[in-house]
Structures are given as structure tokens and as C-alpha cells.
Image (cartoon, rainbow, N blue to C red):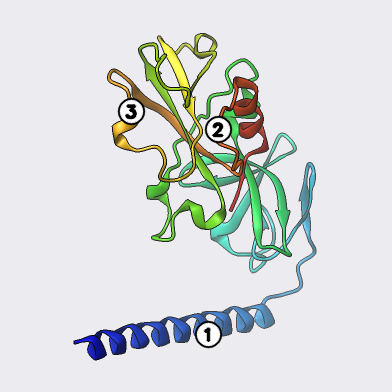
Amino acid sequence: MVVLSSFCCSAQSLLARVAIIILLFRQIHAAKDRPFCAPSSCGKIRNISYPFRLKGDPPGCGLPRYELDCVKNVTVFTLFSGKYHVQNINYQTYKIQLTDAGVEEDIACFIPRYFISRSNFTATGPEHYGINPIPFWNGDPVSDDPRYVEVNGRLCDSGGHVYAVLSSSGEFTMMDIKVGCHLKAATFTNNNHCNNVSYADIHECLHNGFSL
């Protein structure tokens, strides 16, 4: 039985490696076939190139699923139906830094406009990217859990108290949700310092965004 299990694991590992090799081959082949495309720019993002493309770029430049938009001189990426401002694209580390559009567009209420959670990702989870969730809860006053950091929900017309909870993945569970609280919004942060955070820390985390 142990031998069979070991064989199955080895076979799965081999299939995974073959799939990766095929994918890389296809990407290299596609790169050779695609036309020359000069980098595009929008606002502070000055080098938009493959695999990204800017809306309006010639066909064949970049991949459609990585299309960016330029709105009022701000680079915008649509992720799971949410609009996120692009802060940076690092082609060396293959990462893009995003900020919830609501955080930057509404200076009075910096609560995220969109929902993004673990369920949006593959089995590897958001921790694969080194990011931690920040859920926002709306409900009754909370005084017995320091992880609940109250934000100024009155400016957001929330109709109650709003709390942000910054914790490492897996440290905040369903059992920690207070009675009477419901989820208002959720986003991510690259901040790994999750203990004793303040209102100002949460605000800074949201403006810095997260990287994928």
C-alpha cells in the first residue's frame, strides 16, 4: 500500500512537471510569434509590456486577460470584477502591486470597495504571495478583542461600528467573529506585522496595497 501511494505521488509530480514544461514551451513559442510592441504608459506606470497590455494597444500586444485600463491618468486592473489601481509592475519578480480603487478615490472613507478573499485564489492560497487578509466587520461595539481596530465608519454611512482585523492567515477563524457583526468588505495587505496595529497602520496598509 505504501509503495502504491509513493508511486501515485511520483506520477502526479511527474505529470505536474510535464505540464509546466509544456506551458513554458507554449509561452516561449507565443513570444517568438507576437509582433514587436512598444511599451505603453499611463500615469506613473511607464512600462506596460508583455504579458500586460493597455486598452487600445494593437492586437497581439500582451494578453487580453491582463489588459489594463487608463482612467483619469491612473492605471486600473480589473481583478475578480473589482477595480484596482496599479501602483507598480515588477517584471523581474513577476509581481504587480494593487490598491483597492475605493481606498484612493474616497478620501473620507477609506474602506475597500470590493471583496477579495481566499476563495478567489487557487489551492495555494493568498499566503503563497506573502499577503494577509484584512476583513472589515460592521456591527455592535467590540471591546474584548484587540485585533478589532475601529475605523471611522461614520464617514462611510455604515450605520454602525466598523472594525478592521489584520491577522496572519489562519490566525483569525470563524470562531473569532463577534455576534452581531457582518462582513462589509475584504482586501489584502503585504504587511506581516499583525500584532497591536493601529487605525493609522490599517490606513497605511490599505494605501500600500498588496502584490500578486
Residue 165 point in image, percent of width and height: 47, 29
Above or below, comparing residue 7 to residue 71 in the picture: below
User: Secondary structure under badge 3?
Assistant: loop
What amino acid is found at the position of numbered circle 3 in the picture? Ile
Is residue 55 at least partly visible in the picture? Answer: no
- Of circles 3 and 1, the one toward us is 3
Q: Which residue is mark 3?
A: 177
Is residue 145 at least partly visible in the picture? Answer: yes
Outermost left residue? 1
Mark 3–mark 1 distance (CA, rounded to whole Å):
44 Å
Q: Which residue is mark 2?
A: 195
Mark 2–mark 3 distance (CA, rounded to whole Å):
17 Å
Q: Please tell me which residue is depicted at 40% across the width and 15% down the height of the picture.
A: 142
User: Secondary structure under badge 1?
Assistant: helix
Disc 2: CA contacts within 10 A as few (<14), some (14-19) or many (>=20) = few
Q: Please tell me which residue is depicted at 60% across the width and 55% down the height of the picture.
A: 67
User: Secondary structure under badge 2?
Assistant: loop
Q: Nearer the viewer, residue 36 or 77?
A: 77
Q: Which residue is mark 1?
A: 21
What amino acid is found at the position of numbered circle 2 in the picture? Asn
Judge left or right: residue 160 versus residue 191.
Answer: left
